[in-house]
Image (cartoon, coloured by chain):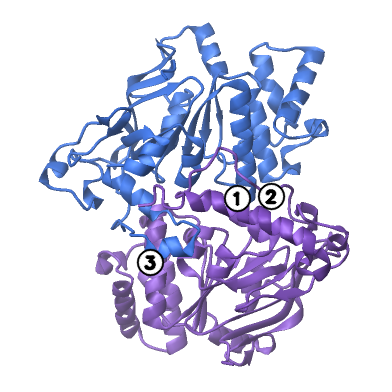
Amino acid sequence: MERKVLLETQDLRKTFEIRGRGTLTAVGGVNLKLHAGETLGLVGESGCGKTTLGRTLVKLYRPDSGRILFEGKDIWTQNRKENLHYHKDVQMIYQDPYASLDPLSVVSTSIGEGLDIHGLYRGRERRERILELLQMVGLNREHANRFPHEFSGGQRQRIGIARALAVEPRVLVCDEPISALDVSIQAQIINLLMRLQQETGMAYLFITHDLSMVKAISDRIAVMYLGSIVEMAGAETLYARHCHPYTEALLSAIPIPDPEVEAKRKRILLRGDIPSPVNLGKGCPFAGRCPRADAKCHDSCPELREVEKGHFAACHRV
Amino acid sequence: MTEHILDVRDLAVSFFTYAGEVQAVRGITWHLDRHETVALVGESGCGKSVTIQTVMGLLQSPPGRVTGGSIHFEGLDMLKLTPRELRSIQGNRMSMIFQDPLSYLNPTMRVGEQIAESYRLHHRVNRREAQAKVREMMELISFPEPERNMRAFPHQLSGGMRQRIMVAMALICSPGILFADEPTTALDVTIQAQIIELMNELKEKLDTSIVLITHDLGVVANMAERIYVMYAGKIVERGSAADIFYRPRHPYTWGLLQSVPRLDARQDRVFRYIPGTPPDLLNPPAGCPFAARCPYACRACAAYMPEETDFENAHACRCWLYHEGAEELRKKAEADWKEQGKEVGSHGEEGAS
């Protein structure tokens, strides 16, 4: 089944200058395709550049080089009107539900702002639309006139989702939407997001470090390490037939809530920490921690190549 | 029966605030044996952190106050100690590691000094002897480049390294008990795996018992031998790790186990979850605190707190389902649970490497 490509990045790079220390490569040449209606999981540890990638996609950062195409058109060469449309079509929900809502605005103002900017609804209809959105995300009509501090973390995340949905986006970039929430609340928010996807056909780019959660909800998963995608495949394929040593180590590090399974499991412990993304060398970014690295790995950076249909990996040893 | 290293009986802790008395811990009894790892599991606000803070004598008072019960550590009555006696135990015979190492490390002190601090305080040794001990400790936790990193400040180290420093600080006096409050929650999974491995290894080497506090059942499965499940200030179920994971009895434990996605299970896209939120402990319900969220609740549940029902092998739970009058409901509930267990079990080996 081939679905239409909605959002595409071509060799996308985003670096930050750190005074006196050099260049931090947050995103170093990423090629991604997001199809209409699919969920693409983007996983990696902290500092791997996944959030920067998400923010670059919603135009919060300007990439250094490379292109972002939305329906085949470069988003940085758009005119004003197209730009406005892009912001309507691609929305984002944020990790921290405490910091991402304006504490001085009541919920209906926060949700209604997008409607006003895009001139979608006015007057009575606008009011009705806001109440409808609140109900869609499992809140009450009475919540419309309350301030963010009156809500729990899970409820705030629902408000953030309602705000993003207000302008009927076609792509939702979800940046760790559940990692600040309690376990039982996480499941509620995930179920909500899955239901909304069925109802609206939105595509999700789901950024997270929680591999067991992302496995259950994604069609495809991309694994990021130090600014590069090291492996990308269908969700089941990635878990069953991953071939990049980093993916292998990452998967084996995740504890499974089952003592017997855990006692029998073989764990690949990575030595050391994730290296600093400042002034990266020329070799494979994972070479320093990789149990299988050889001279070639330290010398040249492997390209992402297709190892089987729809399954890509960037490793010299595969 | 052997003497428990830590014996907590009917402990109740309240916080007296302007809004009223918040009953954070409402009569819990638990113990820890030598060489054992015990986990207190529950959602945020269930009282697990307050419990170990109280045990260690770190409860902030006011507003907190122990309103009942007793704590015995190696035969000492912890609630009757003078502040001086308490200080000789804290960091020495029992110590603690916290979730966020950055906020518990002193940013203006070199980490080597910080590791040495409690050792010098409790053992009255000079700087050089303390530094030798620190070096020994750094080797024990396989810290990279110990000579150089001893002179580093916390902000120069990564999250995983800082957590290692916390572990070294906590274990330098070889305490009888190590309390670990969400020790890996702030860490990445590959680093989390390192820290879990480290704690399990040091427990053997240093002859320490561990009390683990976490909401992550994956971490619990890796470390704990026995588990106490807490909900709204009460222990609702206790038992061996095997009993809690494979033969859970309390509907809350069922809910908790079901709401965690498992890497090794094929899953449909709908997660089970526990609807609603925990009760307000300003005004705790008279009956079972879980009644409002429990799919099997009946009238008795809301009105009366159930007594503990014992099963084999020190496995016990507080739930009216195990009262003789509730037999039919219990059969239905157990059938539901088995049904769901099958779904996970049948795909058990899938994808686990």
Say whether mark 2 and mark 1 are on the same chain: yes
- Residue identifier under label 2: B274
In the rendered image of this protein, does residue B202 appear above or below residue B106? below
Q: Disc 3 marks which amino acid?
A: Glu
Q: Which residue is drawn at the image coordinates 39% and 59% (left, top)?
A: B193
Work out whether residue B23 can be spotted: yes
Q: Disc 2 marks which amino acid?
A: Ile
In the rendered image of this protein, does residue A19 appear above or below residue B5? above
In the displayed structure image, the side of residue B240 where residue A117 appears, left or right: right
Q: Which residue is drawn at the image coordinates 33% and 59% (left, top)?
A: A266
- Residue identifier under label 1: B259
First reached walking from the N terminus: tag 1 or tag 2: 1
Q: Colour of chain A?
A: blue
First reached walking from the N terminus: tag 3 or tag 1: 3
In what element is the residue under mark 3? helix
Residue A188 in picture, x, y percent from top left = 65, 42
Residue B299 in picture, x, y percent from top left = 88, 59
In what element is the residue under mark 1? loop
**Disc 1 + disc 2, Cβ < 8 Å:** yes
In what element is the residue under mark 2? loop
Label 1 CA crowd tier, 10 Å (few <14, some 14–19, many 20+): some
Say whether mark 1 and mark 3 are on the same chain: yes
Quadrant of the frame with the N terminus of chain B:
bottom right
Q: Disc 1 marks which amino acid?
A: Ser
User: What chain letter is assigned to the residue under label 1?
Assistant: B
Q: Nearer the viewer, residue B312 or B234?
A: B312
